[in-house]
Amino acid sequence: MILEKAFAPLGSSPRTMPPRGIKGAAPSHSAAAGAFLSILVFSDELAPGAANRLRAEVLAGIALDGVDARGPAEKLPELLGAAVELTRADDLGLRLAKAADPRRFGVVTYAASTSPTLRAAYERTARYMGLWNEGVRLELDRDRAACLTSIVLRFQGKTAMAAPDGLRQLAELGSAAMLMLGRSFTGAPISPVRVELASSAPADVRPHERLFAAPIAWNAPVPRLIFDDGQRAGPLARSQNAARLASRATFLARPGNVRPRARR
């Protein structure tokens, strides 16, 4: 069976938080097949045979083939946690975000890339990302007095009840993907003024420091990227028009067009 190499970022959903406590009381959300397939493909590159094991042990009975295929969003953190065990890549979420070409985000990228500013691009991303993952809500919080804007990830439904290790990987993947998206749109190595992650610091934080290039606070209430409003007010780079983005997105969705980047 051919695995599509389609990377999927995190997304937004309705703005109400789910009930907590009894697992059955939490709503189940869905995520696009590409969200799962990208993890499978990348894991297999790092540890040959990992994709088959992950399909059998984590995704058994879940059909992911087909343009409109979706799977249970709460399986994503479980899949990431299992993939870390097989690949021994503790920074797997960060690696996934770095290896992905943001132009493969499909309609989400198309909508965001036609925005006049990075601020508008992130607003559109928050609006449409639920198409990819309904288990994660993306919010923009603005502190007008300090001229700062936060991009916040909030887990919801059964996704929020996943194991901590898997949620850590999902949060790091989502946070890093949002930063890489901004760098792609602006054509500049932008960095937040501060990063907050909800997990404890791993044994080796150097991959996080290299990617985010900003102070990192651990054990925060929610994952958060904090940007200076001046960065987000500038125009997007126009070196790629919408038509080229669309055609490039189609090309990169084909098998064989993505490889993990070498770790620096």
Image (cartoon, rainbow, N blue to C red):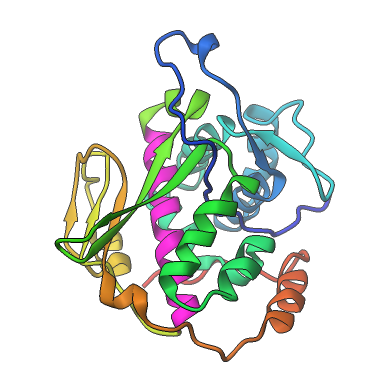
Q: In this rendering, would 141 be left or right of 156?
A: left
**Residue drawn where x is 68% and y is 58% of the image:** 6
Q: In this rendering, would 179 be left or right of 223?
A: right
Residue 191 horizontal/vertical position (percent): 29, 72
Residue 47 in view (yes/no)? no
Could you tell me how many numbered marks the image carries? 0
Residue 192 horizontal/vertical position (percent): 27, 67
Magenta stretch? 165-186
**Residue drawn where x is 74% and y is 65% of the image:** 253
Is residue 93 part of the magenta span, yes or no?
A: no
Instruction: Assign the magenta stretch its main secondary structure.
Output: helix
Residue 141 horizontal/vertical position (percent): 31, 52
Residue 62 in view (yes/no)? yes
Q: In this rendering, would 254 be left or right of 83?
A: right
Where residue 13 sits, quadrant-wise, is: top right
Q: Residue furthest bottom?
A: 239
Viewer-side residue, 91 vs 223: 223
Quick check: 205 above or below 199? Answer: below
Where residue 258 sits, quadrant-wise, is: bottom right
Quadrant for the C terminus, please: bottom left
